[in-house]
Amino acid sequence: MSDGRLFGHAPPKEPRERLIFALDVDHIDEAERLVKALAPHVGMFKVGPRLFTSAGSLVMDLIHGMGSSVFLDLKFHDIPVSVAGAAREVARLRTKMFTVHGMGGKKMIQAVLRELGQMTLIPGLPPPIVLGVTILTSHDQESVEAIGFDRPISELAMRIAKISVDGGAGGIVASGHEVTALKDALPEGTVFVVPGIRSAADEVQDQSRVMTARQAVEAGATYVVVGRPIRLAKDPAAAADRIVEDIAQANV
Ligand code: C5P
């Protein structure tokens, strides 16, 4: 794939680099145990609002100290100047990728890209990849209609993805089932980050439309996000290795 929208980051080459582990814990001690066990087995760690609110830059230092990278999934959605300011701080934390709500609009995303473009960067450290979030999977048709959107969710997600990328986002967070259509509609090199990954043997938990890692990569995922199937496994490192082996089977 072209690295045009990776803003200078190398595209994942090894199957392991495609695996993002969702570090969905709320305490730094638990995060430390998992980061130490998993850093050699996964490509990146996803930090969400729970852990970031509780442990902030401590967890960033922990992950970077193990030689790994951070996907900061805080889903920013605010007026352009506020989100641009947050993006600056995210870049200062040496984040590899972070999320913004595409629903914040093209101007919001353009403001983020402008801010990142004006920063003096540490040599050799590219700016973070900006990922647009479309419609949360917790929405259904009824709940989007309650807001006043009368279009099918799939159409809304496509529109928001296009707005995000038009604004300069490097990629989109999408379900494995959306990726193929998005890939056809968005520029070459757009990064796709896909959660909702399960193997045939896994419990599905609250994820409804799941795919295996191999299927997601074959559908066009650049990265897959996996949380509970690794975190709740008896041996998390072995569970991560099995997913990497699955990715390695992908015909891409
Ligand atoms: O534990 P599990 O593998 O379901 O974790 C998936 C991760 O991906 C969680 O951190 C969750 O917030 C995130 N996610 C998701 N579905 C989306 C977007 C993000 O499960 N549509």
Image: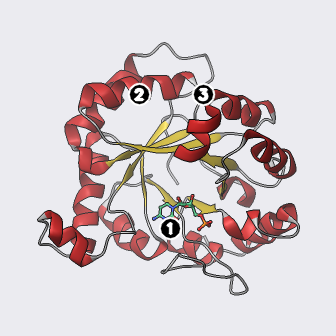
Residue shown at 33% from the left, 48% from the top: 101
Q: Quadrant of residue 53?
A: top right
Residue 48 is at least partly visible in this image: no
Q: Residue furthest bottom?
A: 200
Q: Quadrant of residue 133?
A: bottom left
Secondary element at image label 1: loop
Which amino acid does the dot numbered 1 rest on? Gly
Residue 146 is at least partly visible in this image: yes
In the image shown, does 189 or 172 lie closer to the viewer?
172
Q: Considering only vertical position in the picture, is 108 above or below 190?
A: above
Q: Considering only vertical position in the picture, is 28 above or below 22?
A: above
Which amino acid does the dot numbered 3 rest on? Arg
Q: Residue furthest top?
A: 120
Which amino acid does the dot numbered 2 rest on? Ala
Depth-wise, is mark 3 or mark 1 nearer the camera?
3
Secondary element at image label 2: helix
Picture coordinates of residue 68, whole percent (x, y)? 74, 39
Quadrant location of the C terminus?
A: bottom right
Secondary element at image label 3: loop
Label disc, if present, on residue 220 of the rendered structure: 1
User: Which residue is disc 3 drawn over?
Assistant: 94
Depth-wise, is mark 3 or mark 2 nearer the camera?
2
